[in-house]
Image: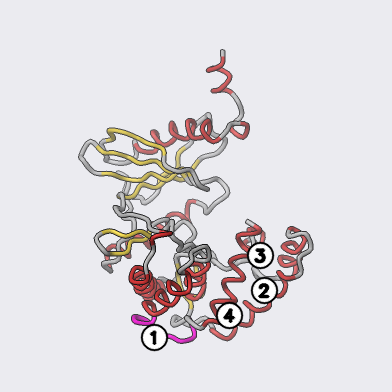
Amino acid sequence: MADFQANTRPFAELDRAGRTRRLRRLAEAALTAYAVPVARLTPLAHGLNTMFRVDGADGHRYVLRVQRPDGPGAAQVRAEMAWLATLRRETDLVVPQPVPTRARDLITVVADPAVPEPRTCVLCHWVDGRFADERLTAPQLYEVGRFTARLHLHGGRMNGLDRGRVDDLTEFGRTQVDGFSAAVVDRAVTAAGGDQRIREAVARVRAVRAELGYGADAFGLVHGDLHQENYLFHRGRVRAIDFDDCGYGHYAYDLAVAVTALAHLPQREELREALLDGYRSVRPDAATTDHAVLAAFAGLRRVQLRLH
């Protein structure tokens, strides 16, 4: 009786383990779209999306991502995969390599009666490496800076992909023509309990965006969430994963995300300067790495995380 009740309970009432079990069945169905002989499917850490490690009978490993229903839609996920595929083809940057379906699509959309809505799924080759965080060193952050600059050089050429802005203030802001409109800011202030400092943060970012402009030297396709859980190291080289939040924005936003994520580390100032030095070694653009510019985008990032 308990098993029957577990299988018939509404998805929204399940705990994380229960949802993962349901989504595992959906993941198994998604894998039938790929010419990959599956030996084992293992749940990974559950974030906004649900991830599974796929061990192939061919000896290769993959990651299957089951997209959250309130995240980017199928067209936007396909655009994300298109950028990754282009990066793999046109650069030596190590990022996830999408696996096309048998139909040569970069996504598959799967439905399961036990899950309330169809889910977009993608399969990528596994990216080897180790995360560092507390063990991060200045030479490593220098390489992260170089990697980020090269990513931005490529992103500046990727026009027209179906991806949104990374700097919209809130989810509601993404539905508006202006992600910083008065209505968006008013809602954000209300959601933050009337904290008027949000208006000040928005005003600073507005001024910085206007000063930087929107030319390819300052604005393009960026990762959008480049922190210690999304870059790793393998044999001295940096690798980046989880491009789910990628979109259009100022390059300084990506750097501000990386800098903000170092705040808990005692060596944060040394790491910050190494990151910026590495970036400038590839893109000697003083405006993008200016401390006041980064501080403005860091303030925006903190507001976004608070209201997420």
Q: Which residue is mark 4?
A: 209
Q: Which residue is mark 3?
A: 176
Q: Who's the residue at 54% across and 51% down the image? A: 71
Q: Which residue is mark 1?
A: 284
**Between 163 and 295, the one nearer to me in the picture:** 295
Q: Counting other residues with Cα less than 10 Å from the Cα at mark 4, is it few (<14), some (14-19), or many (20 or more)? A: some
Labels 4, 3: front one: 4
Which of pointers 1 and 3 lies earlier in the amino acid sequence? Answer: 3
The spot of residue 21 in percent (x, y) is 47, 31
Q: Who's the residue at 39% across and 71% down the image? A: 148
Q: Counting other residues with Cα less than 10 Å from the Cα at mark 1, is it few (<14), some (14-19), or many (20 or more)? A: some
Q: Who's the residue at 26% across and 38% down the image? A: 56
Which of pointers 2 and 3 lies earlier in the amino acid sequence? Answer: 3
Q: Counting other residues with Cα less than 10 Å from the Cα at mark 2, is it few (<14), some (14-19), or many (20 or more)? A: many
Q: Residue furthest top?
A: 1
Q: Which residue is mark 2?
A: 202
Measure the alpha-carbon separation of dots 2 and 1: 27 Å
The spot of residue 246 in percent (x, y) is 47, 62
Which of pointers 4 and 2 lies earlier in the amino acid sequence? Answer: 2
Which of pointers 2 and 1 lies earlier in the amino acid sequence? Answer: 2
- Judge from the rendering whether residue 114 lies leftward or rightward of residue 65; answer left or right: right
| Span colored in magenta | 280-288
Labels 1, 3: front one: 1
Measure the alpha-carbon separation of dots 1 and 3: 34 Å
- Judge from the rendering whether residue 59 lies leftward or rightward of residue 127; answer left or right: left
